Amino acid sequence: MDVDEFLQYFGLSLKYIKRGKAYYLYDEKLEGYNDVVASGVFLGSMKKHFVPSFPLLEMIQTDKEAIVDKKAAWLFLCGRDMFKEGIKRLNGKGLVLVKNELNEILGLGKVVNKGNVVIKHVLDRGDFLRRER
């Protein structure tokens, strides 16, 4: 999935600029500058597929979400998949925002319903800390 497909999937219409493999929210104040390395809000980067940033996830207003209990939230932040027991409410198929009971975005998951796994872990706030090792 590329950046345009991701934005369309979640119903976002944003202007962005690409710098290398990174995407930034378009800022008209920088119009005409060609040597800008980074600008504005970082939206994500392209790996094998588009990897969104958490500022971008916070911009999403959607009902494609999973609300999970406290224990499941902790496990998701540790990179684990979600089981039925920990999910309080699930709306949508495909990619969903995973949120805790306080409606805080924990990350992104994919609804799979394979065996015990209901939501496959895609991205969470703990990824940043795990990469710092």
Image (cartoon, grey):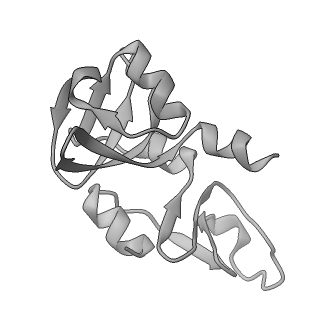
Q: List x then y, in percent, for residue 42.
A: 64, 57
Q: Is 118 placed above or below 67 here?
A: below
Q: Identify the image quadrant of the N terminus.
A: bottom left
Q: Is 7 placed above or below 2 here?
A: above
Q: Is residue 112 left or right of residue 130?
A: left
Front residue of 80 and 104: 80
Front residue of 31 and 62: 62
Q: Is residue 81 left or right of residue 58?
A: left
Front residue of 38 and 107: 107
Residue visible at 81% across and 75% down?
A: 36
Residue visible at 72% across and 70% down?
A: 30
Q: List x then y, in percent, for residue 2.
A: 42, 76
Residue visible at 70% across and 65% down?
A: 29
Residue visible at 42% across and 16% down?
A: 71
Total marks shown come to 0
Residue sitting farthest toward the front: 115
Q: List x then y, in percent, for residue 21.
A: 64, 78
